Amino acid sequence: MLRDLIVALCVALPLVLLPGYPWARVLCGEEDRAARLIFGLALSLATVPAAALAAARLSGTGVTAAAALLGSGAVFLSGVAVSLVFGPARPADKPLLALPSAPLGPAALLPLGGALLVGIGVASGAVPGGWWPSVAAALLAGAAGALGLARPGGGAGFPVPPRASALRAFALPASLLLALLWGYSGPVLHDWPFIRGVDHYSHTVMANLMMERAEIYPYLIYPPGFHTLTAVICRLGGLDPLELFPVLAPAFLLLPALALYVLGRTLWGGGLGELAAASLVLLGGTYYYFQDAMYPNMVTAQFLLPMTLAALLRLYAAPGPRTSLLVAVIGSSVVLYHQVSAMYLGLLLALLCVWGLPYLLLREREVGGWMLLSLALLGSLSVLYAWDTYDLPGLVRGLVSGSPGGAATGEAVGMALGTQPPYSFSFLSGTMVSLPVLCLGLFGLVLAAGGTVRRAGRLSYLTLVLWAFVLFVGSRTAMSGFPQRFGRDLGIPLALFAALGLVVVLRSLVPRRPLLVFATSVVALLAVGLIGVRGAQSLQYAAGPSVQLTMTPGIAAAGEWLERHNTGGNIIVGPHANQVPSRMMLAMGDYSALQSFTRKQILRPRDLPPRGPRPLVDVLRVVENPAGGEVPEILRRYDVRYIVLYKNMPDRPTRDYWRAFADHPGLYRVRFENRDVLIVEPRFENGSSSDAPERPADLR
């Protein structure tokens, strides 16, 4: 595992940092080196997969090592050339929002202290769970922000002590080390050589498809960005995706921390960015993405989308062609990586166009004009990225004819709407977002309105509030299609404002009347205590065993056998509980079909492949009645070479499909068997059983 980690880092770090860095110097005008590197990382993630995919499509092959080198090299060399011609962008590092200059008064301290006290009570178990403590804490925190906003005083913040400036040099590395500890502790102690989460098997299949033929269809309707990037790293590092994810996936938790750093620094200057990055460990939604192996969601919704907003904030402050191009390139990559995050971006930009763009075009024509041009370019690139993935011509034809379900994308949307229940409010606020982020975030969100003394600040505040609003509304209705993902992502904008709220509380510890000093100290201790309790719980949970570890050595041995004996064709895997057991064997055996779903999932579809239900029903016919008269024709139709049956699984009950196959040795030959898995080979030839000599079973 150490060798794989070294190889993965030696390939991944240069690949994601170098190609976009020259472009970052040209486009973002960032004096802070760390922020410039992060913008370079965002630009690499936005452009390298697109360039590598274009090279693969032009050559008519999959993402080969040559396509990977050509794509990354083209991005880097073009950036160097543009940098030599146009030079770096003019720095524009002035914070967009002002910190409150007046310390908090008793009117704000009292409700804020009450909100934090409720949070500590819930975290410690002293207050019973349910929705009402979270609602009470949220209302008290919002009221505290409003009362703090009403207190006289505004403009520039307190001067930063010199020692605080010196400590900042270590704050960001410390925050990133905390994120790495959060990600790697559990896998190192419990998982390796495997990795927690189940979706990485689907990502493995899709990455393999990108390497083989540069497309994901018909496995799923999915954008190719993340899997193209994975294919590039695998080609250049010589690793299989199933070898890459266990060593590299925990490092994905760095990405939300980096985005929070850039946003905090852009809005309020140094200090806030580092604190926002450190708040990552308080966000349960981020860790749940990692624990479920929903890597594209995390990379897109919690890095590329926030970085798009950071670029948009820079456009407000310094309108021009460079910042407009920066917004368009990073923003369009959201469509290249994930469909749900593209929904977030589309909703947010639509609201901005309704509430902000008309005013800008009338009163601030320079900003409005460049913003309109940027959005037009972003939309054009997004259409280009989405053209093949979502069958846009077919979707448009279906909409015109009044039957959007006629396109595969329309069917996929119809499957998702209204099928996933939202999280309960207590789970959303207590686990996904966490109570310290909820309390301090709402407090900071209201209080930040007092810092909008400039036009760019007002636009920035409106953008962030609309971002949080879109995520909150989407998390509370099943008609968003993915309310649980909206809920997981809500913590990111709230964490940004929570950093502001904590800073305001700590900066209020100034020499004043003894009673006010005492009240402020109590509130500060409550805030730090709640953060400490939640942070310790989060790190302890991450360091423990995972409930999302489906793999065992016996199942892994079956997967290795399938890969060694893969001579083409397809396999059938017995369906269990959801699609994960099927996709797990496909990934390990290097197959992409047939997928298996239970009858209930087929009747209430949500995550089905775009080929329709017939292959899924045929799989059920085989596993439920292996001696049925229609089975030989089904096996010939799909060129089925092996049938894989689970006998035991670590995280779900199994149905004993394998017994029916073991009872028909004349029809199925046992090729592999251990305590967890049975693999059989059909003996059918031209609809009748074969008389070929039996080979010994591979028992492990």
Image: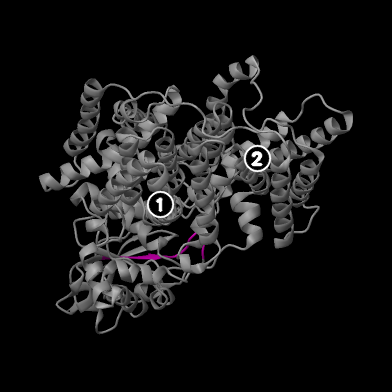
SS at mark 2 in the image: helix
Residue occupying the far front of the picture: 363
Q: Look at mark 2 in the image and give the residue it sits on.
A: 535
Left or right: 495 in relation to 107: left
Which circle's residue, 2 or 1, is located before the other in the chain?
1
Bounds of the magenta span? 642-652
Q: State the residue in front, 388 or 227.
A: 388
- Residue 651 visible in the current orientation: no
**Quadrant of the frame with the N terminus:** top left
Measuring 26% from the left and 70% from the top, which residue is drawn there?
407
Left or right: 373 in relation to 127: left
Q: State the residue in front, 83 or 355.
A: 355
Mark 2 is on which residue type? Gly
Q: State the residue in front, 276 or 572.
A: 276
Q: Residue 699 colored magenta?
A: no
Q: Locate residue 523, reporting x and y percent.
A: 78, 38
